[in-house]
Amino acid sequence: MPDLLIELFSEEIPARMQAKAREDLKKLITDGVVEAGLTYASAGAFSTPRRLTLTVEGLTANSPTLREERKGPRTDAPEKAIEGFLRSTGLSMDQLEARDDKKGQVYFAVIEKPGRPATEIVAEVLEKTIRNFPWPKSMRWGEGSLRWVRPLHSILAILTDEAGATVVPLDVDGIKAGDTTRGHRFMAPDVLQVSGYESYAKQLKAAKVMLDPNERAEAIDHDAAQMAFAKGWEVVPDKGLLAEVSGLVEWPVTLMGEIDGEFLDLPPEVLQTSMKEHQKFFSVKNPKTARIEGFVTVANRETADHGATILAGNQKVLSARLSDAKFFWENDLRTVQAHGLEGMGAGLDAVTFHNKLGSQGDRIRRIENLAREIAPLVGAKPDLAAEAARVAKSDLRSEMVYEFPELQGVMGRYYAQKAGLSDAVADACRDHYAPLGPSDAVPSEPVSVAVALADKIDTLTGFWAIDEKPTGSKDPFALRRAALGVIRLVLANELRIEVSKTIRVGLALNAAVDTVTTRDDLLSFFHDRLKVHLRDAGIRHDVIDAVLAMPGSDDLTLVVKRAEALSDFFKTDDGENLIQGFKRANNILTQAEEKDGVEYSFGADPKFAETDEEKALFAALDAAEAKIAPAMADEDFAAAMSAMADLRAPIDAFFEAVQINADNPILRRNRLNLLSRIRQICLDVADLTKIEG
C-alpha cells in the first residue's frame, strides 16, 4: 500500500486561515479518495506560512472492480420502458440477460466498473480540491484562472511504495506536480527533492522549516519562558497570540527586549494591547513590581548578531507605538481632571446608538434608571448603582478607547479611579460588559451586577421594542449573548429576581407599544437561552420543559434549582419507574374523562377501597402530600423528590392488583378520582406530562 504526500507551496498564507485550511485539505482529499473507492490507514495535515501539507498512510494502490446487478422490466414490457432501462444502465440490448421471475421473464443488467489506479484517482481529487478550495478570500494572478489565497508556486504530489516514489500526473494551469519543495525563504531557499514523508520532514527540518505548527508554538512558548525566567520575569500567557505568531514563521527565533522606563507607568492592559495588536509581541511581567517591563518578539530567521539588529528595530517601532499610547493616556487624564468622568462622556449624546433607540446618551439614562430599580434586588445601594451607570460608558469618548476599542471598560476603571470615584463605581465601569463569553468571569460585586444586568436588559428590551429580534443564525446585535449574560449573572450570584418585572421596566423605558405581548415573547427568549445553558450542563430538554411549565418560571434561580433536583431524581430507578406510573395513571384518567365527558378531580374516598393495595395507596398519597407541599414551599426540592419516590412501590402494587374500570360505577369513579390524586400530587412538583419516554 503506497503512502501519499501532498504539499501546496505558495506565498505567505495569513496565519488566521492556516488551521482551517489544513483541516479542509485533509477532509477534501480523504473524502474524495474514499468516495472513489480507495481506503487509507491514517492521515495528518500540517501548515507553515508558505505551505499546506498532507500525508496519507496506507492508501490502497487501486480501487476495486465493482459488479452491480440491476433488475429491469419484464421481457414483454413496452418498448419505451426497455429503452429507458438501457439508457439508465448504459448497456445495449444484447448485453441484457433474460431471467425467470415469479411473474415471467425479466431483464437483468450486469454492470462492471473496472478499478482505477490510485495515481489517477488522486490526480482527479487533488485538482478538484485545488480549484474549489474554500478560502475565505482568494486571488488570481498572471494569466491563469486559478484562484488561491496567495500565488501558488508549486505542487508536490507523490505516491511512495517499496518500488520508490511516483509523481501524481497533474497540471493545474501550468503548475505541474513534482517531487520537489524548497526550504526556508532566507536561510535555505534551494530546491529539495523528496521521496516520501520521512525524507520530506527530515530535509525541511535541515532546511530551517518546522512543519508542525504545534512544534513551532511549543518552541516559542518554551524559549520565551526560559528567557523570562533568566531575568526573574514571567511571560503573560496568550494562547491566541501564540497560535497566530506560530503561523507567521517557519523557523521561530525568540528574542526578548525591555520596555523603556518612560512607558512603565502606563496601565498594563495598554502595554499588552498595544504590543499585541501592533507588533504581535508577548508581554513579560516583573512579578516583583507587578508591571509589564519586557516583551518577547519572534523572528523568522537566525542572524549573525543573534537577533540584535532585529531587536533594535523592533524596539524603535515599539517606542513609537507606546509614545502614541502615552499621549492618549495623558490627554485622557487631563480631560478627567478638568471635567470629571461624566464630563468625558458628555459627548455621547451626539453619538447614535441606533436610529430607533436614540443616542448613547439616551441609552445611558435608561441604564441608569434600570440600575436604580435593580440595585435593591442585588444588594446594591440605588444611588451608587445609578452613579456607576452614568459613568460606565464614558471611556467610549476617550482617545485610548478610540485607538483600542477592546479596552473599553478596562480604561473606564482607571479613569474612574483617577477621578476619585469609589472602588465600587470603578469596578462597575470595568465589569458591566461582563460576561461576554462562556469562559468570562461573572461579576459578583453588587454595584457591578446591577449595572451589568441593566446594560444587558436595556439592550434586549430596546431591540425587542423595535422588533429587531434574532432570526435563525443571524443575530447582528448579539442579543443571544446578552440574554445568556443575564442568565449567568443571575445564576452565579444566586439572585432571586423576577425577570418579567425587569423586562417590564426596560420596555417602559424604551417606550414599547405592546408591553404584554413583547414581555412574554422576551421571557420566552430567556427560557430558550436557559435551555441551551442547562443542556450544556447535562440537563435534558424535557426536564427543563417540565419545570418551565410551573409557576415562577421567570425566577431563573428557582427554575434551575427545580431542574437540577428533577434531573437527579430521574437518574434513579425510583424516578424512572415513577414517571411510568404517572403516565399510566394520566393516560387512563385522560381517556376516561374524554369518554365520560366529566373531570375526575375530587372525591376519592378510602372507605370505598377494597384491596390492601388500594388502601396502601391512599395512605401513601396522604403521606406524600403532607411532605411535598411544605417541601416545595421551602424550596427543598430534594425532599419533595424523596417524597415522590416513596410513591413508586404503592403505585406499582396498585396497578398490579386493582382493576380501574370496575363494573361497579361507584368503585370505578372512586378509583379514577384516586388516579387524579396521583396526577395532581406529581404535577405539584413539575409538569411530568412534558417528560418523554
Image (tube, helix red, strand yellow):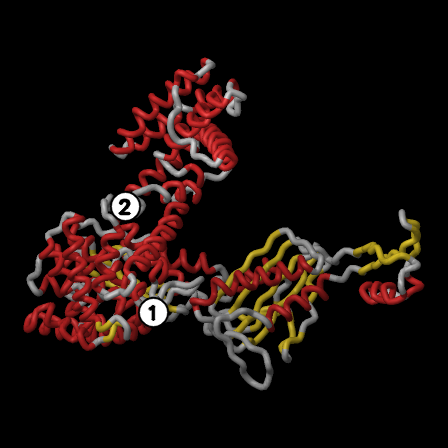
State the residue position of label 1.
307
* Residues at marks 2 and 1, CA–CA distance in whole angstroms: 61 Å
Q: Which residue shows up at 36% across the image and 41% down it?
A: 547
The foreground one among 540 and 45 is 540
Where residue 551 sits: x, y (%)?
Answer: 31, 42
Q: Amino acid at mark 2?
A: Asp
Residue at 44% across, 71% down: 14
Label 2: which secondary element: loop
Residue 257 position by quadrant: bottom left
Give the answer, above or below, for where 110 lies relative to 467.
above
In the foreground, 485 or 404: 485
Q: Position of residue 209 (x, y in %)?
A: 48, 65
Q: What residue do we see at 71% from left, 57% from top? A: 37
- Residue underneath mark 2: 555
Quarter of the rendering occupied by the N terminus? bottom right
**For residue 260, which quarter of the picture?**
bottom left
> Which residue occupies 24% across, 32% down?
634
Q: Say which amino acid is labelled 1.
A: Gly
Few, some or many residues within 10 Å of mark 2 (<14, 14–19, 20+): some
Tell how many labels.
2
Counting from the top left corner in percent of width and height, residue 319 is at 22, 73
Q: Nearer the viewer, mark 2 or mark 1?
A: 2
**Viewed as shown, does residue 627 lie left or right of 270?**
right
Residue 289: horizontal and vertical position, in percent? 16, 56
One can see residue 225 in this view: no
